[in-house]
């Protein structure tokens, strides 16, 4: 069984494209960054070294339910 040159070129091109896609995904994933300007209540990420997004830090549901469960009694 012989493998034609076109098949080898297609295989090589597929491997190169897969490697480029993998490298792009590796560098484009969001990275957490510190923001001294906004403070500790904010969580910021930078994607692909270009786009920076910030959002308020989420309060875990466990803390919220504890605060609601402990209510001062009247009397």
Image: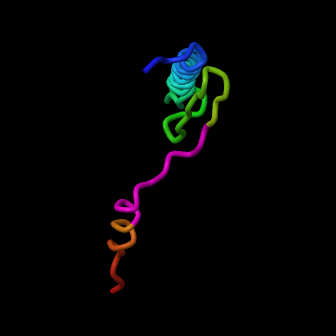
Q: Residue at x 60, y 28 (%)?
A: 47
Q: Give residue 25's position: percent from left, percent from top.
A: 54, 27
Camera-side residue: 13 or 63?
13
Q: Is residue 50 left or right of residue 20?
A: right
Residue 27 visible from this viewpoint: no
Q: Identify the residue at image location x=59%, y=43%.
A: 55
Q: Residue 34's spot in the image, x, y percent?
A: 51, 26
Vertical side of 72 occupied by 13: above or below: above
Residue 15 seen: yes
Quadrant of the snapshot with the N terminus: top left
- Left/right of residue 1 with respect to residue 45 in the rendered view: left
The image's colouring method is: rainbow
- The tally of labels here is 0
Q: Nearer the viewer, residue 36 or 73?
A: 36
**Front residue (pair 29, 64):** 29
Q: Position of residue 72 (x, y in %)?
A: 35, 75
Report whether 53 appears left or right of 1.
right
- Residue 72, above or below 9: below
Q: Is residue 57 magenta?
A: yes
Q: Quadrant of residue 37?
A: top right
Q: Nearer the viewer, residue 13 or 48?
A: 13
Q: Which residues are magenta?
A: 54-64
Q: Residue farthest to the right?
A: 51
């Amino acid at each position: 069984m012989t493998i034609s040159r076109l098949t080898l070129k297609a295989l090589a091109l597929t491997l190169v494209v897969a490697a480029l896609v993998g490298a792009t995904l590796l560098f484009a994933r969001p990275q957490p960054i510190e923001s001294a300007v906004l403070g500790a209540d904010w969580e910021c990420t930078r994607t692909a070294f270009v786009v920076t997004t910030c959002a308020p830090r989420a309060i875990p549901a466990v803390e919220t339910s504890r605060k609601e469960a402990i209510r001062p009694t009247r009397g």
